[in-house]
Every structure is written in structure tokens, then in C-alpha cells.
């Protein structure tokens, strides 16, 4: 089978969720013809499959061929972010903006890593730099909303999330962020509405079902709460969520 046919077969398998076949195809392509692009495809399939150590090796191989490949660097930065290696993620995102200062998503991703490492002042400054690059970046407004939440500035957070929705109505994240804020303020109707609108945009977001489960629990809709909690557990695969998954399982058992 030709390189082109293997690549097409791998991409189709990945689209269909057959990650094992996708990885096999991409590896066969690389055995015949190495390229940074295919190392990235293999790494993305490995990340999606939870094979993070293998993904690191694939990204390293790709970057050996193309050290300044921004797509590879983004994938590496995002992988570090997922692994909660925030200082490494910050360094990678900074490398991207040093290569191209107009890469607004790299500015914002750096800010997210800074926020996760509790550098709220640095995160806000970086987000402001992102808005200097693109004042209509929904990603930057959403990140500023998260920063405001961390600083307990809820009124400002709501404004940033609402602006993010105006700028990109297809992004479910600010909907779910607003749902959490309204839930915390006991406005359950608004919280449920934003949860539903966010999940309508992306039904695969685990945290949306978690929030919706607690909303239903507070509204004494026990069976709906159980259904949403169970959906959360089906979707949430992150190791970082191990404790919350255990808590949710306990809540389900208590409701049965």
C-alpha cells in the first residue's frame, strides 16, 4: 500500500475512533517516509488513546526533524498542560510566541498554564497581551473569565464569559462556566439553561453533566441527577479527576 493510501486509511480510522488502526497506519507511513506532519498525526492519536509517554516520543521525533514546527510545539505544550507540568507548558508556549508573536492561542494557552500554577497576575498580563494581538479572541475572553473567577471577581467573570459567547457562539466552554457561576449563586434556572446550551453545542463534555447532575440533585430530580452523574463517569477519563469520580460514584450509590 502506498504512503498516500496508508495516510488516508489512518486518517479515516482516526475519524471513526479506531485509534489502534490509525496508529498502525501512521507508523507504517513513518517506516517508509519520515515527516514531522505524520509524527504529529501519530502523537495526536496516541494522546487521544491515553498513550502519553508514546506521544512524547513521537513529538520529540517530529521536532528533531522540524524544531520550529508550531503545530508540533502546540501539541507538546498542550500535552504538558494535560499532565499538569505547567512550567514546561509555559516554556513551550513562550517558544511559539517567540517564533510568531501573532499566535494568539499560544499567548492564551500560556496564560492558562500560568493560572494553573497560581500566577494569576502573570496570567492576566499574558491574556491582555493576547487581546493586543486579537481583541476579538473568544479564547482570551474565556481565559480572563476563569482568571476573574480565581480572583473571586465574579461580576467581571460573567462579563468576560458573556463576551466570549458573543464572539464565538459555537464554543460550549463559556456556557458551562456561566452554569457553574449561576449554580454557585443558587440561580438554578439560569445554571440549568447554560448547562443545556453548552451540552447542546458539545454533548461530550463531561463537566457539563457533572454540574447538571448537581443542579438536578438540588431540584430534587433524583433520577435525572443519577443519569447525569453516570454520563459524567462514562465520559471522564482524566487521571486528574480520579477523586471527583469517586465522590460522584458515592453520590450515585446514596441516591439509589
Image (cartoon, helix red, strand yellow):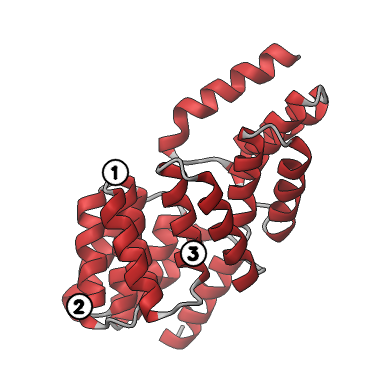
Determine the CA span between mark 3 and mark 2: 22 Å
Determine the CA span between mark 1 and mark 2: 23 Å
Q: Earlier in the sequence, mark 3 or mark 2?
A: 2
- Mark 2 secondary-structure assignment: helix
- Horizontal side of 159 relative to 228 (left or right) equals left
- Horizontal side of 245 relative to 85 (left or right) equals right
Most foreground residue, 127 or 231: 127
- Mark 3 secondary-structure assignment: helix
- What residue is pinned by disc 2? 98
Determine the CA span between mark 3 and mark 1: 18 Å
Q: Which mark is residue 118?
A: 1
Q: How many marks?
A: 3
Where is residue 197 drawn, in percent x and y?
74, 55
- Mark 1 secondary-structure assignment: loop
Q: Earlier in the sequence, mark 3 or mark 1?
A: 1
- What residue is pinned by disc 3? 141
Query: Counting other residues with Cα less than 10 Å from the Cα at mark 1, is it few (<14), some (14-19), or many (20 or more)?
Result: few
Amino acid at each position: 500500500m502506498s504512503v498516500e493510501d496508508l495516510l488516508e486509511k489512518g486518517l479515516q480510522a482516526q475519524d471513526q475512533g479506531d485509534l489502534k488502526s490509525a496508529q498502525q497506519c501512521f507508523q507504517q507511513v513513518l517506516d517508509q517516509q519520515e515527516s514531522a506532519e505524520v509524527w504529529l498525526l501519530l502523537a495526536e492519536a496516541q494522546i487521544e488513546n491515553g498513550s502519553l509517554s508514546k506521544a512524547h516520543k513521537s513529538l520529540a521525533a517530529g521536532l528533531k526533524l522540524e524544531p520550529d514546527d508550531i503545530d508540533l510545539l502546540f501539541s507538546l505544550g498542550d500535552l504538558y498542560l494535560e499532565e499538569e507540568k505547567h512550567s514546561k507548558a509555559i516554556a513551550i508556549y513562550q517558544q511559539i510566541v517567540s517564533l510568531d508573536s501573532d499566535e494568539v492561542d499560544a499567548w492564551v494557552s500560556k496564560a492558562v498554564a500560568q493560572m494553573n500554577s497560581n500566577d494569576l497576575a502573570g496570567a492576566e498580563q499574558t491574556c491582555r497581551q493576547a487581546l493586543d494581538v486579537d481583541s476579538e479572541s473568544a479564547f482570551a475572553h474565556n481565559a480572563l473569565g476563569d482568571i476573574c473567577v480565581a480572583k473571586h471577581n465574579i461580576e467581571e467573570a460573567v462579563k468576560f464569559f458573556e463576551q466570549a459567547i458573543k464572539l464565538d457562539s459555537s464554543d460550549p466552554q463559556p456556557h458551562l462556566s456561566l452554569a457553574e457561576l449561576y449554580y454557585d449563586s443558587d440561580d438554578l434556572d439560569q445554571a440549568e439553561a447554560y448547562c443545556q446550551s453548552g451540552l447542546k453545542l458539545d454533548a461530550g463534555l463531561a463537566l457539563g453533566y457533572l454540574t447538571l447532575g448537581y443542579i438536578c440533585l438540588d431540584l430534587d430530580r433524583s433520577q435525572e441527577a443519577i443519569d447525569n452523574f453516570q454520563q459524567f463517569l462514562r465520559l471522564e477519563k482524566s487521571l486528574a479527576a480520579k477523586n471527583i469520580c469517586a465522590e460522584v460514584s458515592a453520590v450515585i450509590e446514596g441516591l439509589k
